[in-house]
Image (cartoon, rainbow, N blue to C red):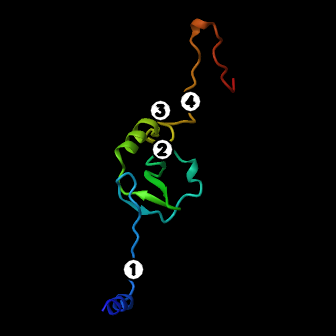
Amino acid sequence: MLSLLLSLLLSLPGCTVRTYPPAVGGYATVYAENVPPNIYAYPHVSYGGSYAYLVDDRWYYPSEGRWVVLREEPAELRHYRSTYIQQAPPAYGRYPYRQYPYEERRSAPPAQYGYPPPAVPGR
């Protein structure tokens, strides 16, 4: 009877095991499709036993020989971003303080300094 049960179990089709990306610090992840070639140059902070790298507002994390992306931003990483990552000022245009950057107002210096009046061409 035992041999019949054993042969029955061995004849069953094999089960497939689906692997999911590992959770990092209790947060769900997805496998990264494209990782920047210079990812180590991006801002990073120690998190969950390794380093998390901030690339284009996404946290990349090395795990089991692959890179994963955190689906949510953990509180520790949000704090790091808001405290240590400098945000660029908003872009208002190329010259925010002057409307015409190449036209400068040219006027004669005040007479009180003793400068001669400006030369007028063609006289």
Which label sits on residue 114?
Answer: none
**Closer to the N terminus: mark 4 or mark 2?**
2
Q: Residue furthest front?
A: 1
**Closer to the N terminus: mark 1 or mark 3?**
1
Instruction: Look at label 4 and name its amino acid.
Output: Glu
Image quadrant in which the N terminus is located: bottom left
Secondary structure, mark 2, is strand
Are the residues flagged by discs 4 and 2 in contact, CB closer than 8 Å?
Answer: no
**Closer to the N terminus: mark 2 or mark 1?**
1
Image spot of residue 24 (x, y percent): 40, 54
Of 55 and 52, nearer the camera is 52
Instruction: Look at label 2 and name its amino acid.
Output: Ser
Is residue 114 placed above or below 66 in the rendered structure? above
Q: What residue is at 47 percent from the left and 42 percent from the top?
A: 93
Image quadrant in which the C terminus is located: top right
Is residue 98 placed above or below 42 in the rendered structure? above
Give me the C-alpha separation between circle 4 and circle 3.
13 Å
Secondary structure, mark 4, is loop
**Closer to the N terminus: mark 3 or mark 2?**
2
